[in-house]
Image (cartoon, grey):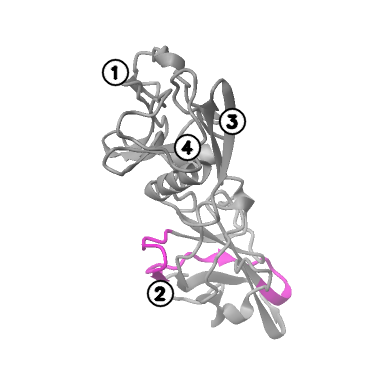
Amino acid sequence: MFVIVLNQNNLVQDGQNNKLVYRFPNSVNLTDKYIAVSSISMFYSWFNILATSINNTLSYTWTVGAVTTTYTLTLPDGLYEIADINAFLQWSSIQNGTYLINASGDNVYYFELILNPTRYGVQLNTFQVPTALPVGWSAPANFAGYPTQTFNPIVTFPANFNQIVGYPVNFVSNGNVNNAYVPPTASASNNYVAKDGAGTLSYLSNTAPQVQPNNNVLFSVSNINNPYSQPSSIIYSLNPNVNIGEQIYVTPPNFMWNKLIDGTYNEIRLSLLGTNLQPLIVNDPNMTILLTIRDKNESFLGTK
């Protein structure tokens, strides 16, 4: 029995910190050998919104006069909660001049994304944009302009981003032009659309939001063929169970032994994958992963 120690010195230097290679000093015969993850120490440092995952854009429309402009918003790579996404929407509204300032000096935004814990979902609210400046209010210097008819901004969640917030693919809200939209009756099988007397429309996500799509980390070893796993190289699954930036430390109470493919090897390669089997981009390279290798008939922790 012997232990392999993998740390940041074993990382493949491609900027993703998700592939580690252990090279044996000499070729090793791994016939009739079994391998298991015996310890993991790393930091929760991967993002949920990434340009490479194509889940970082959404859009909204704003009408000036009778001309409608679409603003496409691109979130920088990062780890976002729903409140963080909403803060980015507000920042974008300020940059685009699509907000007003009420008599109390507060910014008034015309759409928002909030949690609805009662319905275990996310709720999009859009608000009616006036055709003229309300009494006592003011407009920012970069204000985009007023419509000729009242409307609600049309918000679109394209593919991939829609999964983060739990809406259908290419979800599009209604413009409610001149307060004419009549929402459908709510039902258990459909995300409800509510409307108040002031022209506010509310849309509830119709599936559970996947705010953190990589809630499991899969460990893949190049030298095994696990017939009970797809792909067959998966050796271990980890749920971080800590907050972003905190250390993950795991020592499995029962090792999950996998038979190595018979043969002589110069190296062992370990890869970190996300829930959907895509390479997991890890920002913090500080990690230590221990792999234990034993003979077929060698007892360990009461297991053969």
Residue that badge 2 annotates: 301
- Amino acid at dot 2: Leu
Q: Position of residue 297 (x, y in %)?
A: 53, 74
Residue 98 got which mark?
Answer: 4
Q: Quadrant of residue 240?
A: bottom left
- Amino acid at dot 4: Thr
Q: Position of residue 276 (x, y in %)?
A: 56, 48
- Identified at 44% across, 25% down, the residue is 152
Q: Position of residue 143 (x, y in %)?
A: 49, 38
Front label number (4 vs 2) = 4
Residue density around tag 4, few if under 14, some if 14–19, many if 20 or more, within 10 Å: many
Whether 234 is drawn above or below 86: the answer is below
Q: Distance between the residues labelled 1 and 4?
A: 22 Å
Residue 197 got which mark?
Answer: 1
Q: Distance between the residues labelled 3 and 2?
A: 65 Å
- Label 3–label 4 contact, CB within 8 A: no
